Amino acid sequence: MTGEIVWQAPEFEYREKTVLWFWVSIFFGVAFIGVAVWQKNFLFAVFVVVAELLILVWGARKPNMIDFRLTDRTLHVGPHTKYSLGDLAAWSVDDEEPIVWPTIALRFHARLQPLVHVRVPKERLAEVKRALGEFAGKTPWEENLIDTLEKFFGF
């Protein structure tokens, strides 16, 4: 790869939520609090309150745009995070239609490091794939349980 590839992308896929989504979430939160009080498990009730508040706040949050820079040896994510492409074991891409921002999942040699998901604009996808292909092989996209649950619950 010669030079560097620079782009901006949202930090996560935002799904618009209706007022009904928030009311259903509150309903389940109240139901869990009722069960916790009935069982006299007040620590669980406190946990449910904190969790419900986080769900409501995070559910309404819009994604920030993040700067990405792919050089001949490093992927820079935002101003402080970088990944060495020499440690890249494999990568896969979810670019089936109608995805606006295709996602590339990067798997590194470190066993305990989770997959790194990077969003790429469609017009830059081909050159990012070509650059990553110089460092590791492409594997088929596999949607994990967390991704499936996020889509199902609209989160």
Image: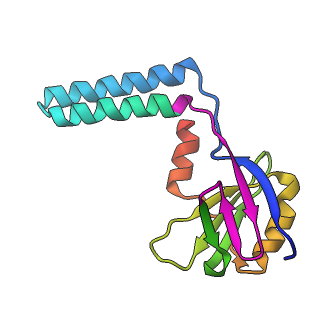
Location of residue 44 in the rendering, given as x and y in whole percent from the top left corner: 21, 36
* Identity of the residue drawn at 80% across and 68% down: 129
Q: Nearer the viewer, residue 51 or 85?
A: 85
Span colored in magenta:
59-80
What percent of the width, then of the height, locates residue 126? Answer: 86, 64
Q: In this view, does 103 lie to the left or right of 23?
A: right
Q: Is residue 38 above or below residue 125?
A: above
The outermost residue toward the left is 40
Q: In this view of the protein, which residue sits in the foreground, 65 or 100?
A: 65
Residue plotted at (62% across, 33% down): 62
**What sort of colour scheme is used for the picture?**
rainbow
Vertical position of residue 83 compared to residue 27: above or below: below
> Is residue 112 found left or right of 144 in the rendered image?
left
| Quarter of image, res 116 | bottom right
Asked whether the viewer can see residue 140, the reply is no
Quarter holding the C terminus is top right
Q: Is residue 130 above or below residue 32?
A: below
Q: Is residue 74 magenta?
A: yes
Nearest to the observer: residue 43 or residue 65: 65
Question: Which residue is farthest front?
Answer: 79
Question: As displayed, is residue 7 above or below residue 134?
Answer: above
